[in-house]
Amino acid sequence: MDIKVLFPTLVAVSQADAATFAGIQAEVLAQEGRIKSLLRPAWGDQVWSSFEAEKHLFVAAGLHRLREFVETSILEFVARTRESGDMAFVDDYSQSWINVTARHGYQERHNHEREAVGLPVSGAFYFRTNGQDGDLSIMPVDMQTKLFDPEVIAPAVGRLVLFRSEVFHRVGANLTDSDRISFSFNYLLRRPQ
């Protein structure tokens, strides 16, 4: 896991190894029909998502390996970047969904903050990409835009990107003829009571 300090936002980028990705791929393909049935137009004309139909896709579609990879990576991110890493997930906050971005699809600058008490973490896992179908840009907060440019992260198959949920980000337009498929998520962590 590569952790970068950006203006002063922490962003983690990790890569699934071949065996982990093969397991995730097998699960996703086994659930392809169920996942496709949940897709709805979202975030512009050329993006389809399961978010409106199912906000807990990892659980609903039985994507256990993907969920385990994401949650293990989040716990590593937290343990490596916080003085006290003894935090646990708040299950009723968790969300996960798939995004399918076709040619000319993109996502405007946004964040995932839901005003929760604790440490909210969001991110994306790239399932299918040609690497040229829209970069992820992590944006500096408004008062830092004169000092810092956005950090651009290219998509790659098996790549996982993690950041705090309040961090603004955007996804560039897919100007290729192949669909990019990614999974997004929101988690909340708190110290056990």
Image (cartoon, grey):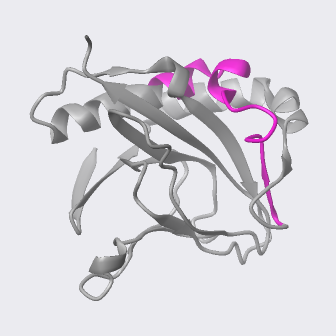
Q: Position of residue 169 (x, y in %)?
A: 48, 65
Q: Position of residue 158 (x, y in %)?
A: 51, 44
* Residue 159 appears in the rendering: no
Range of magenta residues: 46-68
Viewer-closest of 157 and 62:
62
Q: Is residue 132 above or below residue 68?
A: below
- Is residue 67 inside the magenta stretch? yes
Viewer-closest of 143 and 34:
143
* Residue 51 appears in the rendering: yes
User: What residue appears at the point 70 percent right and 49 percent down from the top-left corner?
Assistant: 99
- Is residue 5 inside the magenta stretch? no
Which of the image's four quarters has the N terminus?
A: top left
Task: Farthest residue to the left: give it.
Answer: 83
Task: Specify the quadrant of the image occupied by residue 46.
Answer: bottom right
Viewer-closest of 123 and 55:
55
Which of the image's four quarters has the C terminus?
A: top left
User: What residue appears at the point 59 percent right and 29 percent down from the top-left corner?
Assistant: 24
User: What residue appears at the point 59 percent right and 32 percent down from the top-left corner?
Assistant: 95
In the picture provided, is 79 more to the left or to the right than 142?
left
Task: Farthest residue to the top: give it.
Answer: 193
In the picture provided, is 114 more to the left or to the right than 37?
left
Task: Specify the quadrant of the image occupied by residue 63.
Answer: top right
Q: Position of residue 118 (x, y in %)?
A: 32, 33
